[in-house]
């Protein structure tokens, strides 16, 4: 895997950003690690988001964080249940890293039910319909796949991208969460909240139902017609996006790699 900012770097940048803004951050706590690191700035009720390994796929985190803050602010203003950006959310540059700030939402590890997820997604789409601003088409998967194509010669990556990317560009376009899945819904004492709008984009509604965590029951609970053939193609695009991340990051996950290749290979049948 390419060397990049570490979790410790993200914590240091978060604390530096907080202090520059006059926020108390004497006891930072890492609450999530993935493409980004999230740091709770205790005792302040603020959470930072700092892109770390995600910059391997997306070299310009500033644009993504800026778009995420803008859309989350828009949705919060409509009354939709979202984790809201902090009053001065940024993004900011601190110690060479991009940092955005968010209100802390107390939550537990409960997973939203399938029926609740489908209904919530319908309400999210309705709120986004009003006008969240100018959004790029399927920016998450298309960017990740494009990055992988420049650094990997994996035959399945190139074959599947040659089919799925042109197809994706023909799909209908409406505003989407972009990375909708059960892990991006926080269960709080006041009810479930949407979070993580980094991949917000336009595309077919089926893309927001394509995560492997979304069951058929959740799809059935979505309050609108779903094109099942397009949903199947969106799920393959999601698989291709995951394959791209494995290849760019150099992750040693042979079982997952084989599963993805096997699924994508069936498109040739």
Image (cartoon, grey):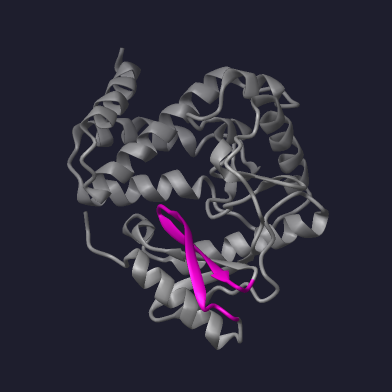
Where residue 246 appears, as percent x and y from the top left, is: 28, 42
Please report the residue visible at 64 percent of the width from the left and 58 percent of the height from the top.
Answer: 134
Residue nearer the viewer, 258 or 147: 258
In which quadrant of the rendered image does the C terminus lie?
top left
Asked whether, in this view, residue 236 is left or right of residue 3, the answer is: right
Residue nearer the viewer, 53 or 31: 31
Q: Is residue 56 above or below residue 98?
A: above
Asked whether, in this view, residue 56 is left or right of residue 116, the answer is: left
Where residue 252 appears, as percent x and y from the top left, is: 20, 40
Q: Is residue 123 above or below residue 214?
A: below
In which quadrant of the rendered image does the N terminus lie?
bottom left
Please report the residue visible at 71 percent of the width from the left and 23 percent of the height from the top.
Answer: 221
Q: Is residue 84 above or below residue 253?
A: below
Residue 96 sits inside the magenta stretch: no
* Quadrant housing residue 264: top left
Please report the residue visible at 52 percent of the width from the left and 78 percent of the height from the top.
Answer: 92
Residue nearer the viewer, 88 or 177: 88
Residue 181 visible in rendering: no
Asked whether, in this view, residue 190 is left or right of residue 64, the answer is: right
Where residue 83 appears, as percent x and y from the top left, is: 67, 56
Q: Which residues are magenta?
A: 24-44
* Quadrant housing residue 145: top left
Please identify the dominant SS of the magenta region: strand
Please report the residue visible at 29 percent of the width from the left and 24 percent of the height from the top.
Answer: 259
């Amino acid at each position: 895997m390419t060397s990049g900012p570490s979790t410790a770097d993200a914590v240091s940048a978060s604390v530096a950003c907080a202090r520059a803004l006059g926020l108390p951050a004497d006891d930072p706590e890492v609450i999530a690690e993935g493409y980004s690191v999230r740091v709770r700035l205790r005792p302040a009720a603020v959470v930072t988001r700092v892109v770390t390994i995600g910059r391997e796929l997306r070299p310009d985190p500033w644009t993504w964080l800026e778009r995420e803050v803008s859309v989350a602010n828009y949705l919060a203003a409509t009354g939709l249940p979202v984790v809201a950006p902090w009053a001065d959310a940024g993004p900011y540059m601190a110690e060479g890293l991009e940092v955005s700030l968010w209100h802390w939402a107390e939550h537990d590890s409960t997973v939203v039910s399938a029926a609740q997820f489908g209904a919530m997604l319908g309400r999210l789409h309705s709120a986004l319909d009003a006008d969240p601003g100018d959004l790029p088409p399927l920016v998450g998967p298309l960017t990740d796949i494009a990055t992988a194509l420049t650094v990997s010669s994996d035959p399945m990556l190139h074959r599947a991208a040659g089919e799925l990317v042109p197809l994706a560009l023909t799909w209908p376009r409406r505003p989407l969460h972009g990375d909708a899945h059960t892990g991006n819904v926080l269960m709080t004492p006041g009810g479930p909240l949407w979070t993580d709008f980094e991949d917000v984009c336009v595309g077919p509604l089926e893309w927001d139902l394509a995560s492997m965590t979304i069951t058929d029951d959740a799809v059935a609970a979505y309050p609108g017609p779903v094109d099942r053939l397009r949903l199947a193609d969106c799920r393959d695009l999601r698989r291709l996006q995951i394959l791209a991340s494995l290849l760019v990051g150099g992750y040693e996950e042979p079982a997952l790699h084989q599963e993805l290749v096997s699924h994508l290979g069936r498109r040739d049948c």
